[in-house]
Amino acid sequence: MLGPTTPILGAPGPVKAGSMFPPGKRRRLNFFGICVCTFLPWFIFLGVYGALCFDLHYNYPALAWFIVAVGGIISVGAAASALNEQKQERDPQWWFFGAVACSIAVVSASICGDLNFRWNLSRYYDINNLQVYEDVKPSLDRGQGLMDAGKVYFAAGTVLDATRSVGFMNGDLFCVAPIIDSSATMTNYDFWAVGKNCCADRADFRCGEYANPRARNGLRLMIDEDRPFYRLAVQEAEAVFNMSSRHPLFFYWMQDPLGAQNAYRDDGYKYFLIGVFTHFGFNLLCVLGATMGFAKLGSRHYA
């Protein structure tokens, strides 16, 4: 005769208080948690990355960084929900995973978006907001009159004077060469072709499209941190070659400035798409790994 405490063959054992894995039952997949953790971090990455890459960052930087802050708030909210689920003795794993995934999305999107903006799209927007000047004559025009130039198309007969090029060393070698009118005598040199680590110390300028006979135009240098070193190189050229440059302007020497400007935009869009799809693939792999890990973890509680 069975007593009140005699265990019945095949019956589940006693359930411990607070256990999140009831014995005798396999843990079912949380499809809602899987879907949320697959798409929510990706949507956050998409929003933050897009806000920092494009013209919203250029025209309304405070709003762009506010969107970054919203992504951070969502991550904190997910972490707080995970702690609350744990406190209520419910299963918090997907909440914790979502909090970590959202945090990774915000941080990675902020870093990659800001870098893509600084190296590509901000330069495109800067040049696009400047003026285009055509038929510029280095022997007649002055840098002070073209301070807002973004793209310059020089007149026929304009060439580089590589014999009076100079390189200024400051970690990198900052190279400059005067842009001159080959058919006129010049007393002032305000237009300079520039490049980095593409020349010897002097009289060996190999920057940009220096060897292209059709190159006769310039795209404005937009890297602010490099400009002081190019100015120092110009000052050195003035002293060495006894020349004058009252208002030097710096350009990349090329045939097609518009194409080079659009290349900044195209690279920005390219890296944006690469980042979006790379993050989705990375997050999807993490979700799949977490799904298998949580299922295995659950099975150990009733094995």
Image: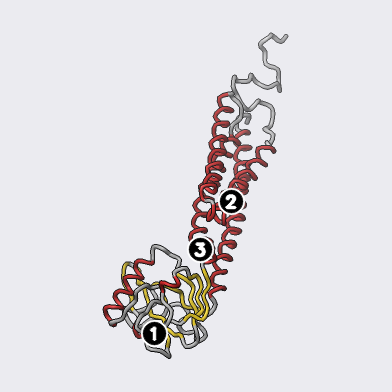
Which residue is pictured at 41% across the width and 63% down the height?
Answer: 224
Numbered disc total: 3
The residue shown at (50%, 87%) is: 156
Q: CA distance from mark 1 to mark 2?
A: 51 Å
Q: Is residue 80 above or below residue 65?
A: above
Residue 132 x %, y %: 53, 72
Are the residues at dot 1 and dot 3 in contact (C-beta closer than 8 Å)?
A: no
What amino acid is found at the position of numbered circle 2 in the picture? Phe
- What residue is pinned by disc 3? 126
Q: Residues within 10 Å of mark 3 (few under 14, many from 20)?
A: some
Placement of 99 over or under 150, stated as above or below: above
Please state which of residues 93 and 141 is positioned toward the viewer in this rendering: 141
Determine which quarter of the picture holds residue 238: bottom left
- Mark sitting earlier along the chain (1/3): 3
Distance between the alpha carbons at the discs numbered 1 and 3: 28 Å
Q: Marks 2 and 3: which is nearer the front?
A: 3
Q: Is residue 142 visible?
A: yes
Numbered mark located on residue 282 in the image = 2
